[in-house]
Image (tube, rainbow, N blue to C red):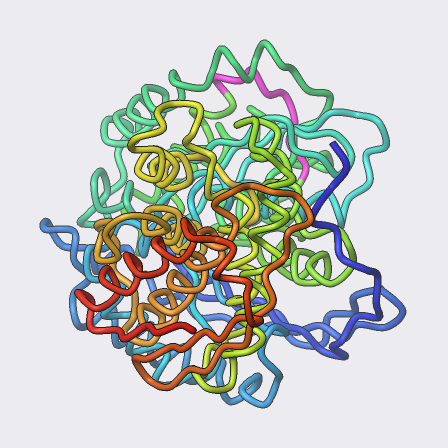
């Protein structure tokens, strides 16, 4: 099927971009200059916030860890707050995925930084890590397995050139394993082996699929693996990166130290002493389960992947467009009807954008994608297809989408027919919820105006909006010839009235 979504090429609009990674162990920011489509890193900033250490038994972040995170974000803001919207992407990973009060933290973050904070799913994190590795290391046609041990999760990717083939994120990381197996800092062969065994059990869920796919080279990225790589070089244990022998030598040094405070390894930063035993235990399990003989290190990882993803969104290679196109095919959506609804809904948005203040950077994209995908549940059941469609979008792996974007799409698809007040169990900020309400109204009206599914029959109308009211005025005679549309618009006025909106038409 020919793409409905690829936009016209145009020059990249930003001279400077930035990526912020709100990780479970550390927060990092990288700033880059963009010149002729090439990135040049101009600044790197980071702090070991250890957000995951603040996760309590009830899966909420304690106040101390939240404050550490906000203090770090405030420092980042000093550098990038003057950059335009769209040029900065802030992504939260495992600790924020797990935290029940993550939106309380996000609200606090938005008070100190002028760019939106997104939470990304584990597999999306894995994809972005692979983009960062693939863009900074060239292995030709060779397949590579990429491993990234974070504070709360570990990502695994097999890919070739710029394309990931398998992506997975497992719930094990150097901070969570430190708390579980090395909480008091003591390091023994016994608690180390317990950590290795726990990691091997986690790996069982992906081991066979990854071994069956196979790879030519193994690459590690981010903190733990960087530390192991630097130790190997600085201690003179290897010139070929990380090997099983190197891991054994590091393990012996950890056992001899007996406690995190006593570790003395060249190449290991002092702030990483508390988590290195947990990280090495996970890495040992990875080597054992995958039979890895040698692993190189990549400087490129999540942050670099986010930078290239920002560029891709303005260079006809937005992965989100490919994802939506895939779903159009996967769920056999009537593309002609989807195009009609999309054209009309975007025309409506353009008319009310200033009156309703629906001006967030992604509103047009979210409405366009929802218009294209609103019938994705039809193949399951017609009577409840809006609910099936919302479930499909909410629960699918959607490369390129943050959790907020994905749930916003699901929200619009759920609410595109019948009760306007239907909702998913997903919390949006007050501002985002208001925008979604207004986008949902536009989507519902666009669908009603094409209820007869006639190609080329484009309604001509003008919209006027103010706060919670909307008036549509049609070309004289247009509604007279469409009694079904008129009846449906009147029913829609009743639905919206129940939600506190006034809709009139003439």
Front-lying residue, 399 or 191: 399
Residue 69 on image: x %, y %: 33, 72
Residue occupying image coordinates x 61% and y 50%: 340
Residue occupying image coordinates x 48% and y 28%: 248
Vertical placement of 49 versus 449: above or below?
below
- The image quarter containing residue 9 is bottom right
Residue 357 is left or right of residue 130, and the answer is left
Front-lying residue, 22 or 189: 22
Front-lying residue, 120 or 325: 325
Vertical placement of 354 versus 87: above or below?
below
Q: Taking the image as drawn, is residue 249 in sight? A: yes
Q: Taking the image as drawn, is residue 272 in sight? A: no
Q: Where does the C terminus fall, quadrant-wise?
A: bottom left
Residue 152 on image: x %, y %: 35, 46
Residue occupying image coordinates x 45% and y 58%: 443
In this picture, which residue range is highlighted in magenta? 288-296
Residue 321 on image: x %, y %: 65, 47
Residue 306 is left or right of residue 135, and the answer is left
């Amino acid at each position: 099927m020919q793409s409905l979504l690829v936009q016209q090429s145009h020059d990249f609009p930003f001279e400077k971009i930035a990526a912020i990674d709100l990780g479970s162990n550390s927060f990092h920011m990288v700033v880059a200059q963009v010149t002729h489509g090439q990135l040049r890193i101009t600044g790197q900033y980071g702090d070991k916030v250890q957000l995951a250490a603040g996760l309590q038994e009830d899966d909420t972040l304690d106040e101390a860890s939240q404050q550490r995170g906000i203090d770090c974000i405030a420092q980042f803001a000093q550098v990038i707050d003057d950059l335009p919207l769209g040029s900065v992407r802030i992504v939260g990973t495992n600790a924020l995925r797990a935290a029940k009060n993550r939106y309380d933290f996000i609200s606090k973050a938005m008070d100190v930084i002028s760019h939106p904070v997104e939470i990304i799913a584990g597999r999306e994190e894995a994809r972005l890590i692979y983009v960062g590795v693939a863009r900074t290391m060239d292995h030709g046609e060779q397949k590579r397995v990429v491993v990234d041990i974070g504070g709360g999760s570990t990502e695994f990717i097999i890919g070739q050139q710029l394309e990931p083939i398998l992506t997975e994120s497992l719930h094990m990381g150097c901070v969570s394993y430190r708390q579980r197996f090395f909480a008091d800092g003591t390091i023994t062969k016994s608690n180390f082996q317990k950590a290795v065994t726990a990691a091997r059990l986690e790996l069982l869920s992906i081991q066979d699929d990854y071994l069956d796919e196979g790879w030519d080279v193994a690459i590690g990225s981010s903190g733990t693996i960087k530390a192991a790589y630097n130790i190997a070089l600085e201690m003179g244990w290897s010139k070929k990166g990380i090997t099983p022998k190197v891991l054994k030598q590091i393990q012996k040094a950890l056992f001899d130290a007996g406690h995190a405070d006593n570790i003395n390894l060249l190449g290991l930063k002092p702030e990483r002493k508390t988590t290195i035993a947990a990280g090495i235990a996970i890495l040992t399990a990875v080597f054992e389960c995958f039979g890895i003989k040698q692993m190189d290190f990549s400087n490129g990882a999540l942050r670099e992947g986010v930078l290239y993803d920002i560029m891709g969104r303005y260079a006809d290679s937005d992965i989100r467009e490919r994802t939506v196109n895939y779903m159009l095919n996967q769920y056999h959506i009537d593309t002609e009807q989807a195009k009609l609804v999309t054209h009309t809904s975007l025309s409506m948005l353009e008319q009310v954008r200033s009156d309703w203040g629906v001006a967030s950077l992604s509103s047009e994209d979210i409405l366009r994608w929802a218009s294209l995908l609103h019938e994705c549940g039809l193949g399951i059941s017609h009577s409840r297809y809006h609910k099936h469609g919302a479930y499909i979008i909410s629960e699918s792996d959607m490369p390129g989408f943050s959790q907020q974007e994905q749930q916003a799409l699901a929200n619009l698809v759920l609410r595109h027919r019948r009760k306007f007040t239907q909702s998913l169990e997903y919390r949006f900020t007050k501002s985002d919820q208001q925008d979604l309400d207004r986008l949902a109204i536009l989507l519902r009206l666009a669908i009603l105006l094409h209820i007869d599914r006639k190609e080329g029959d484009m309604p001509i109308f003008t919209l006027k909006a103010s706060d919670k009211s909307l008036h549509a005025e049609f070309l004289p005679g247009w509604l007279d010839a469409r009694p079904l549309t008129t009846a449906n618009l009147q029913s829609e006025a009743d639905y919206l009235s129940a939600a506190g909106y006034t809709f009139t038409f003439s």
